[in-house]
Image (spheres, grey):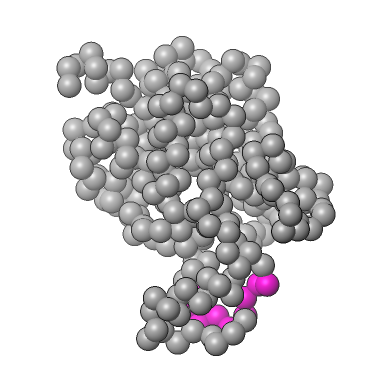
Amino acid sequence: MSTSEEKQKVVCVTGGAGYIASWVVKLLLQRGYTVKATMRDPNDPKKTEHLLALEGAKERLQLFKADLLEEGSFDSVVNGCIGVFHTASPVLLSVADPQAELIDPALKGTLNVLRSCAKVSSIKRVVVTSSIATVSYIAKPLTSGDLVDETWFSDPEFCEKSKLWYVLSKILAEKAEWELAKENEIDLVTINPGIVIGPLLQPTVNLSVEVILNFVNGAQTFPNECYCFADVRDVANAHVLAFENPSACGRYCVVGEVIHCHDALKILQNLYPTLHLPDNL
């Protein structure tokens, strides 16, 4: 690849050490991109070693410190990029201060990243990691006849009353990012995955994978509900394709399987018969 071609293939991945982001970085490096990955502490080996070990990282991976809540923190990082993948956002279900721990980082963080992108004319498109949570949470219970798609939007009032703080943070962030993108003529695409599972590149277990680990680690009670699962490799690939395909636009729900908790447990029992799993839910 010539020097001029390399300069044309520079992208940024925010929250680069995260579960989905690590796979996005891996795929981008495989495709020949130079990747600028941001994180809160690029000197933390738990955040960087798995990234630096990726094929192509030595030549084309650059690590940067950036803070979601610091305005202008991403200005220098996105400068010169042709694309930005904004994956950084806290995933927490139990918090003492929802505003500070979830809503502010999700909402203000997304807006800070997009404001930085608006200053850079070379950026062709921004791909944001959203969630199926911004699509399917409404006050009315879903039925088997409901077809949930990208035209659906979750109800923020219902989520606030129900204290679904993570869901609310994603709803508010996505609403605000579409408004800002329209005002600043940013080419924006969102990826809205279900519960993301699959192989880990990073050394720490994330919240969505814990859903499966709870089955394995002896939990005796499980919710009587269905889960929307998505393989992390499919989710990462969706991010890259959403950037590379000129016709991509709007929102994309990424779900590989919708399955009841009971059936998920049966699959684990069949795959790993030596595990001591509950006989029923």
Q: Is residue 40 visible?
A: no
The residue closer to the viewer here, 180 or 131, is 131
**Camera-nearest residue between 258 and 56:** 258
- Residue found 61% across the figure and 22% down from its top: 181
Q: Is residue 218 magenta?
A: yes
Who's the residue at 61% across and 68% down the image?
260
x and y percentages locating residue 78 in the rendered image:
42, 24
Q: Residue at x 72, y 41 (%)?
A: 153
Q: Which of the image's four quarters has the N terminus?
A: top left
What residue is shown at x 45% (from left), y 80% (from top)? Answer: 269
In this rendering, position of residue 132 left or right of residue 206: right
> In this view, which residue lies farthest toward the front?
145
Asked whether 38 or 206 is in front, the reply is 206
Image quarter for residue 106? top right
Q: Position of residue 120 (x, y in %)?
A: 46, 15
The residue lying toward the viewer, choosing from 270 and 215, is 270
Query: Magenta residues?
Result: 214-224
Answer with the quarter of the image where residue 222 lies. bottom right
Report if residue 225 lies within the magenta region.
no
* Residue 274 horizontal/vertical position (percent): 37, 86
Horizontal side of 165 relative to 236 (left or right) equals right
